[in-house]
Image (cartoon, rainbow, N blue to C red):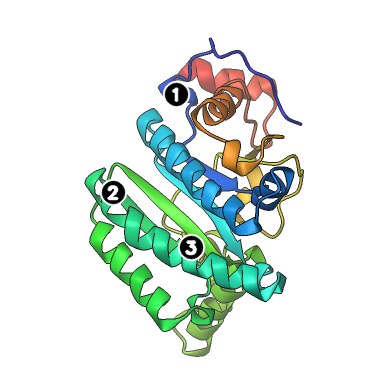
Amino acid sequence: MTESVSAEIPVSAGSRPRHVAIIMDGNNRWAKARRLSGVSGHKAGVKAVRSVVETCAREGVEVLTLFAFSSENWRRPAEEVSALMRLFLFALEREVKKLHRNDICLRIIGDRTAFSANLQEQMARAEELTCDNTRMTLVIAANYGGHWDITQATRKVAEKVRTGELAPSDITDDLIQQHLSIGDLPMPDLMIRTAGEQRISNFMLWHLAYTELYFSPVYWPDFREQEMSQALQAYAGRKRRFGQTDDQIAGVSSEQ
């Protein structure tokens, strides 16, 4: 459920999520409510991205993953998909230098083969420019799906078994995780979905096993600093158990 949290609750370093993942939903509905085109909604959504990136970087979030374009989004009207691709290219060209100036590393995950050669080249350039930045890692999931991610990881592991690099008995949860798109980054602590929908829509299926979920009724273009801060405050009030009892958690806390 969506949570109403007082703005007076501080987000302490110990209760801050290291990795926040967001399903940015509601661009089309935002535009429709204003009798605007769907493209206008997506353009407004870019402004929300800027605000949320700035807020997370300022709050000390280490990794921010944004679900920009799912593998299922190709089913949308051709003109909308084409406009999205143009907007993605424009945003990359315009925003990457700002990310670099702010010491933010950009990584893009998903199956890039469906994108134009020009867009793939811009993705590679943006990643190369920002690869040594350390303040925060911004992950953009584009043509991404959780099923795809698990499948591509499984193929890599299977190939290593085929060549003799690994034995079947070597396969563990950790090994598969290492072969996922962002297997070198911490798992998401907090997943946010905007616009009121309460499902994960094939997003980071492996990664979200123990993630705290937060659903906001706010359409993505209106999700800015205040809404992001409310989500972080809600997370600070959660008690993450990872299968343990309250007594076990209390015991661990008292030992620290």
Q: Is residue 234 above or below residue 124?
A: above
Residue farthest top in this picture: 8
Residue type, label 1: Gly
Q: Which mark is residue 252?
A: none
Where does the image place residue 157, in percent across and percent down from the top left? 53, 77
**Sequence-wise, which precedes: disc 3 or disc 1?**
1
Q: Is residue 214 above or below residue 124?
A: above
Question: In the rendered image, which residue does mark 1 sit on?
Answer: 14
**Sequence-wise, which precedes: disc 2 or disc 3?**
3
CA gap, disc 2 to disc 1?
Answer: 29 Å
Please tell me which residue is depicted at 68% across the width and 20% down the height of the picture.
4
Q: Residues within 10 Å of mark 3 (few under 14, many from 20)?
A: some
**Tag 1 secondary structure:** helix
**Sequence-wise, which precedes: disc 2 or disc 1?**
1
- Which of the image's four quarters has the C terminus? top left
Question: In the rendered image, which residue does mark 2 sit on?
Answer: 98
Residue 169 visible, this angle = no
Question: In the rendered image, which residue does mark 3 sit on?
Answer: 87
CA gap, disc 2 to disc 3?
Answer: 17 Å
**Tag 3 secondary structure:** helix
Nearest-to-viewer mark from 2 and 3: 3
Q: Residues within 10 Å of mark 1 (few under 14, many from 20)?
A: few
Is disc 2 in contact with disc 1, using a CB cutoff of under 8 Å?
Answer: no
Where does the image place residue 168, in percent across and percent down from the top left? 58, 77
Please tell me which residue is depicted at 58% across the width and 29% down the height of the picture.
231
Residue type, label 2: Lys
